[in-house]
Image: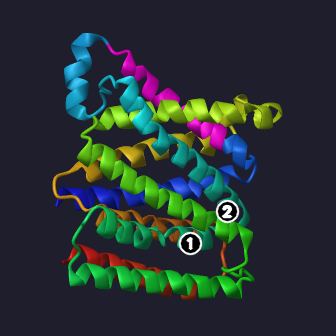
């Protein structure tokens, strides 16, 4: 099914995004990275609002033409934008403080919350194989918590872990809201992405009093190249993910699991470049996640 392939692809792009985020946060503050990513993400979409009329149909066919939204529709979109900015702030603090594989492991618990909410609120029906896949995945995520303890990270008391958990819950709520505005309200896919990006840029502008002294535009295209790369990677991942959500027959609970293939990418890159500890134990946890994903897909 196309939406399954798109969900997997979105996960791989998100894994690259997570790795770039860790690189960017080595030199930049959390709020500065959030500010630039939001502003640059909006900048990527702004030109598509101003293409000549003769090109709109070709852009629409490619999924890049944002149809105009009414003020009411923009207001409906606002909770999504707010949740995303708050999620970034919370998750970036966690990524900056924790080993990347651990913070990504905590974030990977998202499918459980999304699946439970989708079943309860959206009446989605999962097969026994999909429930088994979710259970195996969650067992693997628990294994990550045990590995974290070996690295001196108490999952129950560590503030940065709690930040990532809060970000994960918000992200799950956002995923359900995405399903609502795309599948129930039938809002235009490109418009949702473009207007949300612009809204996030406006929200991020509220951070200026806290980041103004640290802003340095020139460095973004030299030593801090990872910051604009994050903005582009997220726009790409969001485009692929929302296209999957909007596909006929798509289950948001399953797509949430598929997106967590980012954990595989994060693990491979962090092992190669950040020399993290307990690689063998984390490999077992990763295999568990993959088995859970396979069970979820092969239903």
Magenta stretch encompasses residue 293: no
Is 281 rendered above or below residue 195?
below
* Residue named by callout 1: 106
Viewer-closest of 3 and 13: 3
| Residue 237 to residue 190: above or below | below
* x then y, percent, for residue 101: 59, 72
All told, the count of numbered labels is 2
Whether residue 265 sits left or right of residue 27 in the image: it is: left
Q: Which residues are magenta?
A: 34-51
Mark 1 vs mark 2: which is more N-terminal? 2
Under circle 1, the secondary element is helix
Q: Is residue 211 left or right of residue 295?
A: right
Q: Which mark is residue 289?
A: none
Residue 202 lies, with reference to residue 258, above or below; the image says above
Query: Which residue is at a point 42% across and 21% down the rendered structure image?
Result: 47
Q: Which residue is mark 2?
A: 94
Q: Marks 1 and 2: CB-CB under 8 Å? A: yes
Tell me where residue 58 sits by quadrant: top left
| Number of other residues with Cα within 10 Å of mark 2, as a class: few under 14, some 14 to 19, many 20 or more | many
């Amino acid at each position: 099914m196309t939406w399954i392939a798109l969900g997997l692809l979105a996960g791989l792009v998100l894994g690259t995004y997570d790795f770039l985020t860790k690189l960017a946060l080595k030199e930049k503050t959390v709020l500065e990275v959030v500010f630039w990513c939001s502003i640059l993400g909006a900048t990527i979409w702004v030109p598509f609002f101003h293409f000549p009329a003769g090109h709109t149909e070709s852009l629409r066919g490619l999924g890049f033409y944002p149809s105009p939204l009414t003020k009411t529709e923009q207001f409906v979109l606002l909770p999504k934008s707010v949740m995303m900015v708050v999620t970034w702030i919370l998750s970036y603090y966690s990524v900056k403080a924790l080993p990347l594989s651990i913070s990504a492991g905590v974030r990977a618990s998202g499918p459980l919350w999304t699946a439970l909410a989708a079943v309860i609120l959206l009446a989605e029906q999962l097969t026994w194989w999909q429930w088994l896949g979710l259970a195996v995945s969650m067992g693997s995520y628990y294994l990550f918590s045990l590995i974290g303890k070996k690295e001196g990270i108490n999952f129950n008391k560590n503030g940065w872990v709690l930040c990532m958990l809060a970000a994960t819950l918000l992200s799950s709520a956002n995923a359900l809201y995405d399903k609502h505005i795309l599948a129930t309200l039938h809002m235009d896919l490109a418009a949702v992405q473009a207007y949300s990006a612009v809204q996030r840029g406006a929200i991020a502008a509220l951070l200026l009093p806290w980041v103004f002294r640290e802003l340095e535009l020139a460095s973004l295209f030299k030593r801090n190249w990872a910051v604009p790369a994050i903005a582009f990677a997220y726009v790409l991942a969001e485009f692929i993910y929302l296209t999957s959500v909007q596909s006929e027959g798509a289950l948001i609970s399953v797509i949430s699991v598929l997106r967590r293939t980012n954990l595989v990418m994060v693990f491979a890159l962090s092992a190669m470049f950040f020399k993290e500890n307990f690689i063998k134990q984390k490999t077992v946890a990763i295999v568990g996640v993959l088995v859970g994903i396979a069970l979820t897909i092969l239903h």
